[in-house]
Image: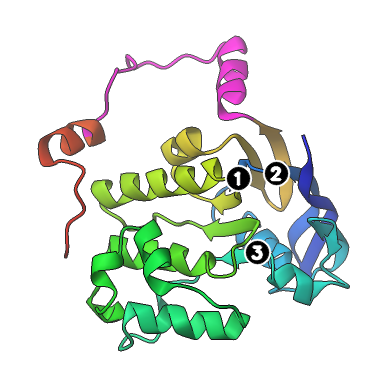
Amino acid sequence: MEKIIEVKNLVKHYKKLEAVNGISFDVFKGEIFGLLGPNGAGKTTTLEIMETLRKKTKGEVLIDGLSIDKDQSKIKGIIGVQLQSAGFYPNLHLDELIKLFAGLYNVEVNPEEILKSVDLLEKRKSKFKELSGGQKQRFSIATTLINRPKIIFLDEPTTGLDPQARRNLWELILKFRDLGTTIMLTTHYMDEAEILCDRVGIIDKGKILVIDSPDNLIEDLLKRGFTRNRTIKEATLEDVFIDLTGKDLRDE
């Protein structure tokens, strides 16, 4: 498999705080790689360094063979970064926002085509502030597609979403992976990581503890004698909720 991200002995210090402490990992082309860990573990700091938004203290990061130290402009041209809601002008229509971001990237795009890819075509003349939470998240992902990136970075993309919106976003992320886009994400939802990620790296206190596929990590835990006191069910309460209310997205 071909590497598209290489992180080697990455270190980030904030005065006496070691936010990232010598971590190394690779991400392969076309996979979804999840960086998991508790709050303050160093996940977001690592992503921001890879996105060229934050300076590292030591180490090396290569994005599709490009160095974050020497090739920042080129890197920005091949990655898509999910913005939080605060990054958008609330009174602009969605197609206006797409055109605005296209201008920043200096590329020609078809706003309707991009909005259609995230099931927001019918909202193209809506203002950003008028969208529901799930629609805002999907639009945020839409903006990562403007420059046709090789890699998309998603930082907790489904936080705060209802079950329908969350599962719809899962389908969207998997669709982009199937089209050949590499996706790196963080999440606090372990069920989300288990469903979406080809591999995960678990980080704590700035250090990578383990990297493997979710299935392999679970199997290894079971081999070491782990058992649950509670019987594992074939379905979850969220499955019941979706079955009763449907998968259709709702406006808030």
Q: Which residue is mark 1?
A: 180
Q: How many marks?
A: 3
Q: Are marks 2 and 3 in contact (CB under 8 Å)?
A: no
Query: Would residue 91 be counted in the magenta stretch?
Result: no
What's the distance in space between the residues labelled 2 and 3, CA to CA?
13 Å
What is the quadrant of the C terminus in the image? bottom left
For numbered disc 1, what is the local secondary structure? loop
Judging depth in this view, the residue of 188 and 143 nearest the camera is: 143
Q: Nearer the viewer, residue 157 or 116?
A: 116
Residue 100, percent from left and from top: 48, 85
**Residue 162 position (above or below residue 128):** above
Query: Sequence-wise, which precedes: disc 3 or disc 1?
Result: 3
Q: Quarter-wise, where is residue 122 in the image?
A: bottom left
Amino acid type for the residue under numbered disc 2: Lys
**Relative to 208, is 171 on the left or the right?**
left
In the rendered image of this protein, does residue 46 appear above or below residue 98? above
**What residue sits 64% from the left and 56% below the top?**
151
Q: Label 1 neighbourhood size at 10 Å, few (<14), some (14-19), many (20+)? A: few
Q: What residue would you read off at disc 2?
A: 29
Q: Residues within 10 Å of mark 3 (few under 14, many from 20)?
A: many
Quadrant (top left/top right/bottom left/bottom right) for the N terminus: top right
Residue range corresponding to the magenta coloring: 213-237
Residue underneath mark 3: 79
Q: Residue furthest left?
A: 244
**Between discs 1 and 2, the one toward the N terminus:** 2
User: Which residue is rendered at x = 33% and y = 85% of the image?
Assistant: 90
